[in-house]
Amino acid sequence: MQKKLTGMEKSKTKTKATAKRKPKKGVGDKVEDALKSTGVKGLVEFVNGGECEGCKKRKEKLNKLFSKGITYNKEKGKATAEQKATIKAIGLDKYRYTSEEADLLEAIYNQINHTSIRLCRKCPNAPKEWKAILTRLEKHI
């Protein structure tokens, strides 16, 4: 017969379980897991004949940018050299951005301005909102 646990005993078992958890994965690891589960990663590796260097760089960059959620810049309104380089590499003069580029631009904007906005990419107002963000990011490069 199983013994019923009291409130104190329940909390002790929860503490033991949480202590055994694996370390949190970064965003790059989560994207890689999603690509693995959908078969995209396997297909890319098959076509390339091995691990994709671009995928590896994307994973590292996302893990670095989002290692602990959003980490804001020390000085609000000032971009770091790395953020400026990323903005220049993506370019602000495009008509369309990949979802990865949009995520990076959004994250950099949030880090610089100490915000946590997330723009809908399907809403009718999305182009106006993106234009405003791109204009503000342009001031930092």
Image (cartoon, rainbow, N blue to C red):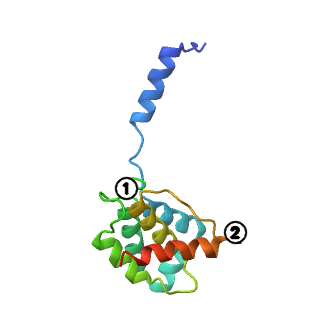
- Neighbour class for label 2 at 10 Å: few (<14), some, many (≥20)? few
- Measure how far apart labels 1 and 2 are at the Cα level: 27 Å
78 versus 57 height, above or below? above
Q: Which residue is mark 1?
A: 71
What is the total number of numbered labels drawn onto the structure image? 2
Residue 52 visible, this orientation: no
Which residue sits at x=58%, y=13%?
Answer: 4
Which residue sits at x=37%, y=69%?
Answer: 61
Q: Is residue 75 left or right of residue 31?
A: left
**107 vs 133, nearest the viewer:** 133
The answer to whether the residue labelled 1 contacts the one labelled 2, judged by CB atoms less than 8 Å apart, is no
What's under tag 1, amino acid-wise? Answer: Thr
What's under tag 2, amino acid-wise? Answer: Cys
- Secondary structure beneath label 2: loop
State the residue lying farthest toward the right. 124
Residue 19 position within the rendered picture, expressed as x and y whole percent measured from the top left:
39, 34
The N terminus, quarter of image: top right
Residue 29 position within the rendered picture, expressed as x and y whole percent measured from the top left:
44, 61
Q: Which residue is mark 2?
A: 123
Sequence-first tag of 1 and 2 = 1
79 versus 85 height, above or below? above
**81 vs 18, nearest the viewer:** 81
Picture quadrant where residue 54 is located: bottom left
**126 vs 25, nearest the viewer:** 126
The C terminus, quarter of image: bottom left
76 versus 132 height, above or below? above
Which residue sits at x=40%, y=61%?
Answer: 111
Residue 132 visible, this orientation: yes
**104 vs 23, nearest the viewer:** 104
71 versus 124 height, above or below? above
